Image (cartoon, rainbow, N blue to C red):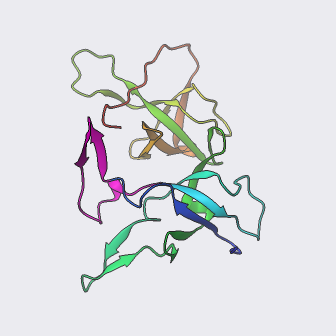
Amino acid sequence: MKSVFDFIIEPFGERYNNEVNVGDKKLILNSEIFNHEFVNRIGKVLSVPIAFETEIEVGDLVVVHHNVFRRWHDMKGEERNSRCFLTENKYLVSKEQIFAYKRKDWKALKGYVFVKPIKSDYKYDSELEKPLVGKVAMNSCNFKKGDIVGFSPGDEYEFIIDNNKMYRVIEKFITIKYESKRNEETYNPSWA
């Protein structure tokens, strides 16, 4: 099966990431379908569009928008699938809903940067992360892995990728690239 303009993908794992392992037990974090924070955002490409060339290939893992695998309740209270739903475990995804892909390593698509938060070094700060600063985690067009960058408030969107907390930032909202050599330590919460 091929689509003209959309990728066909399946969730990599389940539709929702509601559980974590704690020792030899499973802890349920969420039992609601409408909470976007627990929707799986990693998919596996089953088919690429035939209308245009793409760097993404069949078998690649992709980072997608949180509404792709999401379920919701309509005005009558009936449970529905997202508009991306095709058939059981297959979804149609436009190229605008894909932010990064992985063949061997993760690579951000043009226009996006993924950054890891930086640990706060201010001893009197109750925040664990430095606000609006991060270390580039995936190569992109204008930034390479390890660059320290700053970004606009409200323009970051949180993802957990390979058990690492990252923020997706649209490249044009990166406000500064710090050129001095800094020995910044990234912050990854224990729950990630």
Nearer to the camera, 153 or 7: 7
Nearer to the camera, 154 or 96: 96
Q: Is residue 45 above or below residue 100?
A: below
Picture residue at 25% right of the left edge, 86% below the top: 76
Q: Quadrant of the C terminus?
A: top left
Task: Where is residue 86? Give x, y as percent.
Answer: 53, 77
* Residue 155 within the magenta-colored segment of the rendering: no
Task: Where is residue 184? Give x, y as percent.
Answer: 45, 18
Nearer to the camera, 86 or 171: 86
Picture residue at 23% right of the left edge, 22% below the top: 125
- Horizontal relation, residue 22 to residue 3: left or right: left
- Horizontal relation, residue 33 to residue 135: left or right: left
* Residue 28 within the magenta-colored segment of the rendering: yes
Picture residue at 33% right of the left edge, 32% below the top: 189
| Residue sticking out furthest to the front | 24
- Horizontal relation, residue 123 to residue 66: left or right: left
Q: Which residues are magenta?
A: 18-41
